[in-house]
């Protein structure tokens, strides 16, 4: 961008969005900060930090010398994100609310609000990049491989991407921290948020307890032996190791199974019988998937043709080589190497090198089409 533009920046109170706003101001743009309040009802809760975050965002705006507006998107969030989140968990799947939050709130409700303010573009502190090529806006991975957030942005469309800037996508996190300290931003050393956007750092099961019904049922191993009882299938996710409560013999005369001391992992959820299946050992075959089927598709540009790509089935994993086979409203990925704990409800995101093509929601996974 060579000309001065009006850019609305989502200021979260964190260092990434703060440096984003600073860089754009230094480039000569008219920068306006927006603090998005996406959750309410827990303002006095020890795990709810939205009030503290707004104070931090306002302090950053003051140092940089920009205006900041506090906007409440809580109603939109509850309708567009949280309702879908609960529905997925109740159905036994494990959704990724941050993916939906980006598509429905940060780059839809927030974008619409920014356009009403006369913005030319919006900007956020995500570690990702965009590139214009042949009239299309591509979504690219961030330069810092340890912080790349393109996985969470894969549901953005051309209209959203063409209006969005990711200034720190060209930087490593260490450089972002250095810039923040060099201009004495008050949040330069603030710890990164690691919690789900509306849950924060609170214990996850404790939060779900408020909204989901408890339907206890048996915990069984792959041989059908009962090892204990679960509190409700919604409260477990595939690959989960902690909080299973099956440390001893659960039925008189029955061994724990396996005869060794390898840890137990959640491997399958049978909704029909309300049974949670667990297996011992990280490398157990039930935790390995050579293929998956995804639906609820979303592409950053044109839908790709069948071919070879890289894919992520969860954040913070390396791209896994796979064959992509498009279907009618779905696609199948066949992996070169088995993938661990592929989880229905999570996102399968497709990459062509550094370009994020989009993806879908994992519907099922297994060893063969017969298993699906």
Image (spheres, rainbow, N blue to C red):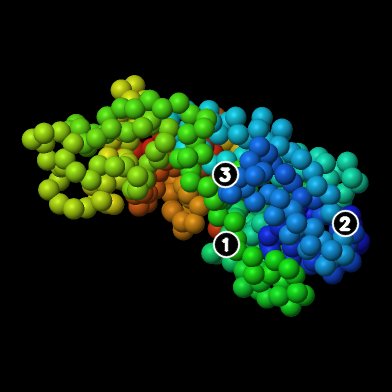
Between 332 and 60, which is closer to the camera in this rendering?
A: 60
Disc 2 designates what residue?
67
Q: Quadrant of the N terminus?
A: bottom right
Q: Residue at x 90, y 59 (%)?
A: 30
Residue 20 position, x and y percent, is 75, 62
Q: Residues within 10 Å of mark 1 (few under 14, many from 20)?
A: some
Q: Position of residue 46 (x, y in %)?
A: 59, 49
In this rendering, the label closer to the viewer, 1 or 3: 3
Helix, strand or loop status at disc 3: loop
Mark 2, secondary structure of its residue: strand
Task: Residue lying at the far left in this picture: please name it.
Answer: 253
Horizontal side of 88 relative to 273 (left or right) equals right
The quadrant of the rendering that contains the C terminus is: top left
Position in image of residue 164 (x %, y %): 76, 51
- Against 271, residue 8 (above or below) is below
Q: Secondary structure at mark 1?
A: loop
The answer to the question of whether label 2 and label 3 lie on touching residues, with beta carbons closer than 8 A, is no
Write the residue at 69% across / 55% down. Answer: 52
Q: Residue furthest top?
A: 272
Image quadrant assignment for residue 101: top right
* N-term mark: 2 or 1: 2
Q: Nearer the viewer, mark 2 or mark 1?
A: 2
- Residue 199 is marked as 3
Residue positioned 77% across, 50% down in the render: 35
Asked whether residue 197 is in view, the answer is no
Report which residue position mark 1 lands on. 147
Task: Give the spatial CA distance, label 2 vs label 1.
Answer: 28 Å
């Amino acid at each position: 961008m060579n000309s001065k533009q009006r850019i609305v920046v989502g200021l979260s109170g964190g260092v990434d969005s703060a440096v984003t706003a600073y860089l754009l101001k230094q480039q000569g743009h008219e920068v306006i900060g927006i603090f998005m309040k996406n959750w309410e009802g827990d303002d006095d809760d020890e795990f709810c930090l939205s009030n503290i975050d707004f104070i931090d965002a306002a302090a950053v705006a003051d140092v940089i010398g920009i205006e900041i507006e506090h906007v409440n998107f809580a109603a939109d969030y509850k309708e567009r994100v949280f309702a879908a989140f609960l529905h997925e968990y109740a159905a036994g799947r494990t959704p990724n609310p941050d993916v939906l939050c980006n598509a429905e709130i940060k780059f839809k409700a927030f974008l619409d609000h920014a356009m009403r303010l006369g913005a030319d573009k919006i900007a956020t502190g995500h570690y990702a990049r965009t590139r214009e090529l042949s009239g299309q806006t591509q979504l690219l991975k961030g330069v810092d491989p340890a912080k790349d957030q393109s996985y969470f942005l894969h549901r953005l469309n051309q209209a959203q991407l063409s209006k969005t800037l990711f200034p720190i996508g060209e930087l490593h996190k260490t450089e972002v921290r250095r810039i923040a300290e060099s201009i004495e931003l008050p949040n330069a050393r603030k710890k990164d948020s690691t919690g789900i956007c509306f849950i924060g750092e609170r214990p996850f099961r404790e939060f779900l307890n408020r909204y989901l019904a408890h339907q206890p049922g048996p915990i069984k191993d792959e041989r059908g032996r009962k090892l204990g009882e679960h509190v409700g299938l919604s409260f477990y996710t595939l690959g989960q190791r902690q909080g299973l409560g099956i440390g001893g013999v659960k039925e008189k005369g029955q061994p724990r199974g396996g005869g060794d001391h390898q840890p137990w992992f959640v491997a399958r959820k049978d909704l029909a019988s309300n049974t949670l299946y667990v297996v011992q050992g990280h490398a157990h075959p039930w935790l390995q998937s050579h293929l998956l089927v995804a639906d609820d598709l979303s592409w950053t540009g044109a839908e790709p043709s069948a071919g070879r790509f890289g894919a992520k089935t969860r954040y913070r994993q390396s791209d896994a080589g796979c064959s992509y086979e498009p279907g009618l409203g779905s696609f199948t990925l066949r992996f070169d190497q088995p993938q661990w704990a592929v989880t229905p409800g999570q996102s399968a995101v497709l990459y062509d090198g550094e370009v994020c093509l989009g993806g879908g929601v994992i519907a099922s996974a297994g060893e063969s089409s017969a298993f699906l």
